[in-house]
Image: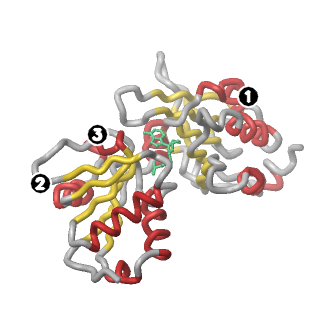
Amino acid sequence: MAEAGSGSLTVVGLGPGEAHWLTPAAQAAIDAATDLIGYGPYLDRIPERDGQTKHASDNRVEIDRAGHALRLAAEGRNVAVVSGGDPGVFAMAAAVFEALEAGDPAWLSLPITVEPGITAMLASAARAGAPLGGDFCAISLSDNLKPWEVVTARLEAVLKADFVICLYNPISKARPWQLRAALELATRHREAQTPVIFARAVGRPDENLRILTLAEALEAAASADMATLVTIGASSTKLIPRPGEAAPWVYTPRSVTKSPSATSQGRT
Ligand code: SAH
């Protein structure tokens, strides 16, 4: 059994894109690392420096990557595992703890830190106005790690409860139909005029924010991609029009006067 040396492991959130959306604590963890581990495109965001080794990997081998990181830390390296957005939101932090739980007991004495980052739903909400002003939730539409029936059961529950819903991993080449299916489900519980935000590549040069109605979003589902965060408004989510070409503000009031049964559940 390996003895844990003086190494450390930090799981770092890079934020959604722009360097100025990286926290100083996350930057300090990156600077202090001897080894950086992560999906290639995330590592590419970090400038090369002497004395620091990058270990790029594929996006679908999180557990191997986490085990590799823990092994390097146990050998005495100062390892930073990088994730886009926040590392705890559908990302590497959970993979690290999964590998820790199943791995060498000596890893339990390693100093492990999680440095938060701005997650996609917060970046997207900030651009749109304040859509998360009332109760909200986040669901990953990926059925790589859970059955699709679980996704639809959870969607149904939060649609009935009238939450604002943020959909991560809405669509990919391997999962082309799930977003449209989720939006179809939403039309059974929410008005066709309900605001839906398609926020793509927020904080990156190709950022694009579209404010649609639920009916329009259903037709536009195929235009979303892996870099898109979809937010479905609650029954109280509203638009404030702006003059000229500017997209309307989207906001959800903090106060709720109607019960869910008077809003979404009534629709069939
Ligand atoms: N840990 C990440 C999420 C990983 S899941 C975070 O906290 O943001 C990957 C999904 O996140 C993507 O499919 C997309 O839905 C969303 N996402 C990540 N970065 C984004 C960005 N810059 N703009 C919009 N959505 C983004």
Q: Is residue 159 visible?
A: no
Q: Residues within 10 Å of mark 2 (few under 14, many from 20)?
A: few
Instruction: Name the residue carrying label 2.
Output: 51
Q: Earlier in the sequence, mark 2 or mark 3?
A: 3
Choose between 153 and 66: the one closer to the eye. 66
Residue plotted at (82% across, 52% down): 262
Instruction: Name the residue carrying label 1.
Output: 215
Above or below residue 170? Residue 149 is below
Choose between 209 and 67: the one closer to the eye. 67
Q: CA distance from mark 1 to mark 3?
A: 38 Å
Rendering quarter of residue 64: bottom left
Q: Is residue 12 left or right of residue 211?
A: left
Q: Earlier in the sequence, mark 1 or mark 3?
A: 3
Q: Amino acid at mark 3?
A: Asp
Q: Is residue 31 left or right of residue 189?
A: left
Residue plotted at (19% across, 77% down): 6
Secondary structure state at the residue bearing disc 2: loop
> What is the residue that sits farthest to the front in this orientation?
1
Cβ at disc 1 under 8 Å from ligand 1: no
Check the picture and name the quadrant holding the C terminus: top right
Question: Residue 17, how many percent across, how many down?
Answer: 35, 40
Choose between 52 and 195: the one closer to the eye. 52
Secondary structure state at the residue bearing disc 1: helix
Q: Residues within 10 Å of mark 3 (few under 14, many from 20)?
A: few
Residue plotted at (82% across, 55% down): 261
Q: Amino acid at mark 1?
A: Ala
Q: CA distance from mark 1 to mark 2?
A: 53 Å
Instruction: Name the residue carrying label 3.
Output: 44
Q: CA distance from mark 2 to mark 3?
A: 17 Å
